[in-house]
């Protein structure tokens, strides 16, 4: 093996220590092998040991996996025996792990068709829900009709809640005991307040649901928040009374129009005892510990819902949607939908939430040991692999998805220690049990020979080495402590001229006995090595991710560098969309180095000037504000958009030069928003409350507009023609006037002043009577 040899570091004094250095290190247990002065050559890479003549005597265990139970996936849920339905395979796996040696197995999950469904309807019966109560009186029949389109095995239950009947949460004065609505003009009569009341166990007789709902009346509490979390917890943990079936999908629909009380709110009423997470329904099926225990915490709710495989559906009014959506990020396996103020859309809401739940698969891990590292790679319906993800969405009923689960033991626990953990799809009853044992002992250790002749009878021979008894030294335990002599000193010098035992030990029986040091261990055949003279990072030796061997850091699996501060893991570089550094950088030492100009953030996810950013921000706006779009799933939205701060406005200001303006079409309208990357790494998105729309003109308007345009153009053309004619006439008249002014006529030559008779003199000559005459003729 080229490069740094981690195995021949000099620190491995036994086979077990060698195996812990690196998963590729092996140990040679052959008796005659290596140097008589050093044992480090016994710990080396496998190919090096074979090349040095140790074939057949090598200790090199590796991690292994065996599938204990592997029942094939089912294709349909409802049938003769629901308990035989299998939605995850395999069901049981046994792992034998060598520290640092990663092994993997594949898990397949399928949402089977026609799976049984138990739905428990938990309703807020405070005064503001009175109109909702009127609208759900026949809910059972209609809901059963819709749900039986999705499953042939459907059961329905009903419960209600208000709040703790103590001050200051409810009206506790004597005059309000029987009717807390006394004096309230809008609704003068109502029933006393109560914490939680289980009214109908899960049943397939939906008419009983309608009957129970019709019996109900609203109550009145004092403050705005309700005690709904008390009711959720009791509905989850009181499995026998509620009637949850093991072989069914569990849905808990929680309807309210206000915010809930949470843990520590009970102190206002003097309740200091935290909730114990147990069932406290009395014989009347009412929550009996309402006035003794505080409200449950979000963590406790999430734990109990997951333990009982319950999908919680928050059906809340629009004004509280954002709050409950934030709850979904803290309570795994929950969804939130917007409930109309009169609950008219409750059936549509439940069906939509159920389809959303059935369209995704997410693996959860229970009781994972601290020294076990797990890495997931999801292969979803598109056939692509997504490292670091344990969830697939956009699934159809019957689709199969798979997950590659890589398991690595980080260290060796005490001997004969085994662990177990469970992999479970969220909301499923099906589980995968994983049993873990550790392969930390060498086989040759079990064949150790005490007082062996190979060790001069003074030690135990194991794995090719002698472990000397107290008071004896030497490769074969041939010397007693204190024996010394100058003839043996040459064996204690690393080279001629160098000090004995590197000046850090004494020479005894051909061997160096290294001094003790307050800083750590000094070791080596010539005491030339120690475990404290290595590079440090932030004052920590080998960054805490490696071991110091002879002045050099030997990094643990997953780390490199002179001081082991550079991680080779890439999980921290995977962005929320599954890409490495969002496709805008490279992963160096477990952190992203952004190469795209303008990109920044832990995974280079921030990039105001990069193409496609508007599309990414649009996904977050659609899922956070409108619960729609590609990221509409609650968990996915929270993961992808955790750094987006969204504000809605009536008028969008675009005068900030650092803000980027984006727009996208929405139903023949245009939704506009701006985003600004903040110094904290978050994004400030400013969005119009409503898309900008332009109303389409009617046909009559278009015809009139065309006619008006033609007439107007005609008038304009006529005006231009008239203008041109006028200009032409004026020019002609001006020219006439000019010519007239230039004319200078004489009266004699003017034709108007000529006589009407013209006289002409003609000269002629003629002969008359032989006489000549000259004259004129008039």
Image (tube, rainbow, N blue to C red):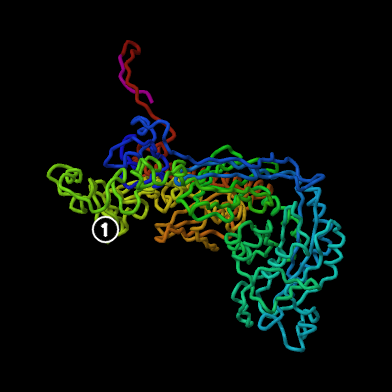
Q: Quadrant of the C terminus?
A: top left
**Residue closest to the eye, 475 or 81:** 475
Per the image, the residue denoted by label 1 is 516
Q: Quadrant of residue 277?
A: bottom right
| Residue sticking out furthest to the bottom | 174
The total number of labels drawn is: 1
Of 200 and 189, nearer the camera is: 200
Question: Is residue 432 among what the camera can see?
Answer: yes
In this picture, residue 691 sits left or right of residue 725: right
Residue name at image x 63 percent, y 51 percent: 424
Residue 254 in sight here: no
- The structure residue drawn at horizontal position 32% and vertical position 53%, both measured from the top left corner, is 542
Residue 186 position in % (x across, y down): 77, 79
* In the image, residue 777 lies in the stretch drawn in magenta: yes
Nearest the eye: 357 or 59: 59
Q: Secondary structure at mark 1?
A: loop
**In the image, residue 733 lies at what x, y percent?**
43, 44
Q: What range of the chain is rendered magenta?
A: 772-778
The residue sitting at 77% across, 82% down in the picture is 181
Residue drawn 36% across and 34% down? 49
Q: Is residue 451 magenta?
A: no
The quarter of the picture where the N terminus appears is top left
Residue 663 horizontal/vertical position (percent): 52, 51
């Amino acid at each position: 093996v080229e490069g740094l040899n981690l195995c021949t570091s000099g620190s491995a004094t036994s086979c077990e220590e060698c195996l812990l250095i690196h998963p590729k290190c092996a140990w040679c247990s052959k008796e005659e092998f290596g140097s008589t002065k050093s044992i480090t050559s016994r710990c080396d890479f496998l190919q090096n040991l074979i090349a040095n003549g140790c074939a057949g005597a090598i200790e090199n265990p590796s991690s292994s996996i065996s599938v204990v139970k592997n029942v094939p996936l089912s294709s349909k849920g409802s049938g003769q025996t629901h308990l035989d339905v299998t939605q995850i395979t395999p069901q049981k796996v046994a792992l034998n792990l060598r520290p640092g040696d990663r092994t993997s197995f594949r898990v397949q999950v399928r949402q089977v068709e026609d799976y049984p469904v138990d739905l428990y309807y938990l309703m807020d019966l405070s005064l503001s829900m009175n109109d909702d109560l009127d609208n759900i009186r026949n809910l059972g029949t209609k809901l059963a009709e819709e749900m039986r389109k999705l499953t042939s095995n459907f059961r329905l239950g009903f419960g209600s809640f208000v709040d703790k009947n103590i001050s200051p949460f409810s009206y506790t004065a004597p005059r309000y005991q029987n009717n807390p609505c006394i004096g309230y003009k809008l609704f003068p009569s109502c029933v006393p307040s109560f914490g939680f009341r289980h009214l109908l166990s899960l049943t397939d007789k939906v008419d009983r649901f309608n009957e129970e709902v019709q019996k109900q009346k609203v109550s009145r509490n004092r403050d705005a928040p309700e005690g709904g979390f008390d009711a959720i917890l009791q509905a989850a943990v009181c499995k026998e009374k509620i009637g949850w079936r093991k072989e069914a999908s569990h849905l808990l629909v929680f309807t309210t129009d206000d915010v809930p009380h949470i843990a520590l709110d009970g102190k206002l009423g003097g309740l200091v005892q935290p909730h114990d997470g147990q069932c406290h329904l009395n014989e009347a099926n009412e929550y009996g510990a309402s006035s003794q225990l505080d409200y449950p915490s979000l963590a406790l709710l999430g734990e109990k819902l997951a333990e009982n495989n319950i999908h919680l559906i928050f059906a809340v009014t629009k004004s509280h949607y954002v709050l409950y959506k934030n709850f979904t990020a803290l309570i795994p396996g929950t969804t939130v939908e917007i409930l109309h103020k009169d609950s008219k859309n409750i059936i549509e809401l439940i069906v939509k939430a159920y389809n959303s739940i059935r369209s995704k698969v997410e693996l959860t891990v229970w009781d994972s040991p601290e020294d076990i590292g797990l890495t997931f790679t999801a292969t979803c319906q598109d056939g692509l692999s997504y490292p670091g993800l344990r969830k697939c969405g956009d699934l159809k009923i019957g689709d199969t998805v798979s997950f590659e689960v890589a398991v690595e033991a980080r260290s060796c626990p005490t001997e004969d220690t085994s662990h177990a953990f469970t992999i479970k799809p969220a909301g499923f009853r099906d589980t995968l049990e994983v049993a873990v044992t550790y392969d930390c002992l060498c086989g040759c250790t079990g064949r150790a020979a005490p007082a062996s002749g190979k060790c001069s009878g003074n030690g135990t021979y194991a794995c090719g080495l002698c472990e000397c008894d107290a008071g004896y030294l030497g490769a074969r335990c041939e010397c007693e402590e204190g024996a010394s002599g100058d003839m043996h000193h040459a064996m204690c010098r690393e080279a001629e001229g160098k000090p004995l035992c590197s000046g850090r030990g004494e020479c005894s029986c051909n061997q160096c006995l290294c001094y003790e040091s307050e800083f750590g261990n000094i070791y080596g055949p010539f005491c030339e090595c120690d475990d404290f003279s290595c590079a440090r990072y932030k004052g920590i030796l080998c960054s805490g991710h490696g071991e110091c061997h002879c002045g050099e850091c030997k990094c643990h699996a997953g780390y490199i560098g002179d001081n082991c501060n550079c991680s080779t893991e890439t999980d921290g570089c995977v962005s929320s969309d599954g890409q490495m550094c969002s496709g805008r950088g490279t992963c160096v030492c477990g952190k992203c180095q952004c190469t795209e100009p303008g990109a920044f953030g832990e995974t280079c996810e921030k990039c105001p000037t990069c193409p496609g950013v508007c599309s990414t921000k649009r996904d977050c706006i659609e899922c956070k504000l409108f619960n729609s779009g590609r990221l509409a799933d609650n968990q996915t939205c929270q993961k992808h958009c955790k750094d987006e701060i969204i504000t809605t406005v009536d008028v969008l200001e675009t005068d900030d030069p650092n803000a980027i303006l984006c727009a996208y079409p929405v139903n023949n309208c245009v939704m506009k928003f701006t985003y600004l990357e903040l110094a904290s790494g978050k994004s400030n998105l400013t969005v119009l409350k409503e898309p900008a729309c332009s109303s389409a003109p009617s046909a009559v308007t278009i015809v009139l507009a065309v006619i008006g345009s033609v007439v107007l153009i005609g008038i304009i053309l006529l005006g231009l023609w008239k203008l041109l004619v006028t200009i032409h006439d004026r020019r002609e008249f001006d020219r006439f006037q000019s010519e007239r002014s230039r004319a200078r006529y004489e009266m004699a030559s003017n034709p108007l002043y000529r006589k009407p008779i013209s006289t002409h003199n003609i000269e002629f000559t003629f002969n008359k009577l032989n006489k000549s005459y000259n004259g004129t003729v008039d």
